[in-house]
Image (tube, grey):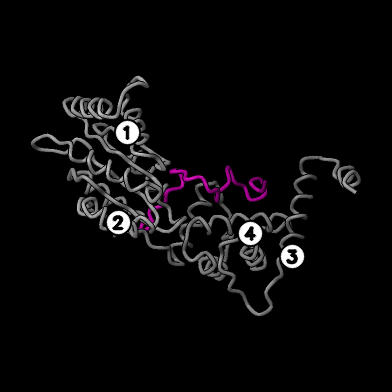
Amino acid sequence: MYQQHFGLGQLPFTLTPNTQFFFGLTPHVEALQVLQIAIANGEGFIKVTGEVGTGKTLICRKLMNDLPSDYHCAYVPNPYLSPDELRWALAAELGLEIQNDLNQQQLTGLIQTRLLELNGQGFKVILVLDEAQALPNQSLETLRLFTNLETESAKLIQVVLFGQPELDNRLQAPSLRQLKQRITFSYNLRPLIWDEIKAYIEYRLGVAGYQGNQLFSDKDIKLIAQAARGIPRLVNIIANKALLLCFAEGKQQVLSKHCKAAIIDTEDADVVLPSNRMNAWVFGILIISASLVMLLIADVDWLSILRESI
């Protein structure tokens, strides 16, 4: 796409939670510090919540990548699982080779034996669940029962929950009060403020290989920050579209009109623009222009393609 135009080695604003782009922003660093302290203390349940797109999965991956070698991490990225399915998933993550005809009592016994075995080998076991707000109540109760497994001095397994604010709401239910009391450390990710977003955008561009002058003006970064409500995922989407539009016009610096058009085209962005706001069709025209430019660069006979479509 526009990498060569801006001198980039890779796309800077993809939505994949790549730890190469992890930037030490205050809320993300604080969340990691809470997690690391809680894990070092051997606590049973740890919880991190935040709005969609605030960086929970990226922090999750960063945590797992940075765990010391004496930790065994079991990761369940999609926990919309029944209690039985959750046990099978945990068993697989613990490296157990099990037969399908085992009943749940036998499976639980094998998991406990494996946890004791890992403990005897000097390993601490961490179970990390992303999107934990999707866990059924019975599965949450199953997790609580697993944290009952312990030696005289330590828990055999710790559980780290990453979830949206709905998880906090669910934990208010009387039926989950026992689990709520087990959560000894928690952190709520806040949105980013505009100067953090400025540093975030510039850092990602730098990691991607950009070495030129400032691509986004401070004024436009404030506009993006307001439209994105401080949510990194929305910042990525808007910045990526603005770069595409800038490239389509052959410009070397992103202009306000590029950012405004990108904001209008982004579903969840807050469109807070001046009274002479651009219409959404302008973005469509610019996207068509960008597509034609890319076809020309690719040496495609686009005139033939247009004739065939008429």
**Nearest to N terminus: mark 4 or mark 3:** 4
Say which residue appears at 37% left-offset and 45% top-offset.
60
Q: How crowded is mark 2: few (under 14 residues within 10 Å), some or many (20 or more)?
A: some
- In the picture provided, is 56 more to the left or to the right than 151? right
Main SS class of the magenta portion in the image = loop
> How far apart in space, not on screen, are marks 3 and 1 (Cα)?
52 Å
**Which mark is nearer the camera, 2 or 4?**
2
- In the picture provided, is 304 more to the left or to the right than 155? right
The tag on residue 171 is 2
Inspect the image, locate mark 3, and give the three-letter code of the amino acid beneath it. Answer: Val
Where is residue 142 shown, x and y percent of the image?
28, 41
Q: Of helix, strand and loop, which one carries label 2? A: loop
Say which residue appears at 70% left-offset and 66% top-offset.
280
The tag on residue 282 is 3
Count how many numbered circles sit on residues in the image: 4
**Nearest to N terminus: mark 3 or mark 1:** 1
Q: Of helix, strand and loop, which one carries label 4? A: helix
**Nearest to N terminus: mark 4 or mark 1:** 1
Q: In this view, does 220 lie above or below 237?
A: below
Cβ–Cβ under 8 Å for marks 3 and 1: no
Read off the residue under disc 1.
Answer: 87
Where is residue 80 shown, x and y percent of the image?
41, 43
Inspect the image, locate mark 4, and give the three-letter code of the amino acid beneath it. Answer: Ala
Inspect the image, locate mark 1, and give the three-letter code of the amino acid beneath it. Answer: Arg
